[in-house]
Image: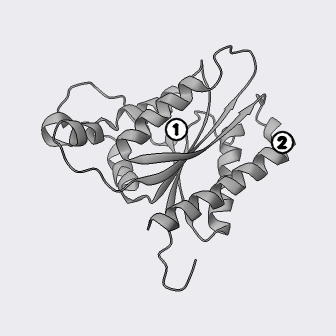
Amino acid sequence: MGAGQRVPTVLCIAGSPRRHGNSEQLLDACARGVEDAGGRAQRLVVVERGIHPCRGCNACSSTGECVVVDPMRDVYPMIDAADAFVVSSPVYFATVPAVLKALYDRCQPYWARRYVLHEEPAARRPGALMLVRGGGDPYGFQCAVWTTKSVFAVLGVECVEELKVAGPDSPSDMGRRPEELARARALGARIVAEATTRD
């Protein structure tokens, strides 16, 4: 960062229901890359938040706010304040796990503000997606990619990079993939560069 330049905050979202597994190890490496590049890595471990599912009540279409009172109330300000995003998740049955999907679905107020209440969207912010899957699923990564990009679009986030790792299953597997951890670290640095150029 140059003198007087604002430090970008990158919201690093851990989407796995299992702590410290392969996808979170990728996120750890990415966060180090963010900080090495002069950014601030803010962690959001979704499974620790206890986010309730969307009720589909459509109240946010009237107010732009979610009526559910739960820990997501603390997450919305984190989303609003972030300069960039990184989501890291395992792939479960071709898409993201339920804990992460609950967070995604609770982004419905952003959709309501944009498409029902016709509020001007915020300036576009950079984002990245890191996905890990074991073998055996014939449907691969694509559903998880589309689901995340759908949420990114509503948040005004442009996905500038995807890192997909196939094969790891047990939590110790990623430690034997130093090249993937290095890619995650480089991704963190790139996100900071992207956020800085859009500031």
Colour mode of the rendering? one colour
Q: Is residue 94 above or below residue 110?
A: above
Q: Is residue 192 above or below residue 143?
A: below
Rendering coords of residue 64 (x, y %)? 19, 42
Q: Residue 177's mark? A: 2
Residue drawn at x 34%, y 38% as measured from the top left: 107
Q: Is residue 116 left or right of residue 133?
A: left
Residue placed farthest to the right in the image? 176
Query: Residue 106 at x, y = what percent?
Result: 34, 35
Q: State whether residue 154 appears in this view.
A: yes
Q: Residues within 10 Å of mark 2 (few under 14, many from 20)?
A: few
Q: Secondary structure at mark 2?
A: loop
- Horizontal side of 120 relative to 72 (left or right) equals left
Disc 1 target residue: 47
What residue appears at the point 49 percent right and 53 percent down from the top-left corner? Answer: 126
Q: Nearer the viewer, residue 134 or 115?
A: 115
**Quick check: 9 above or below 5?**
above
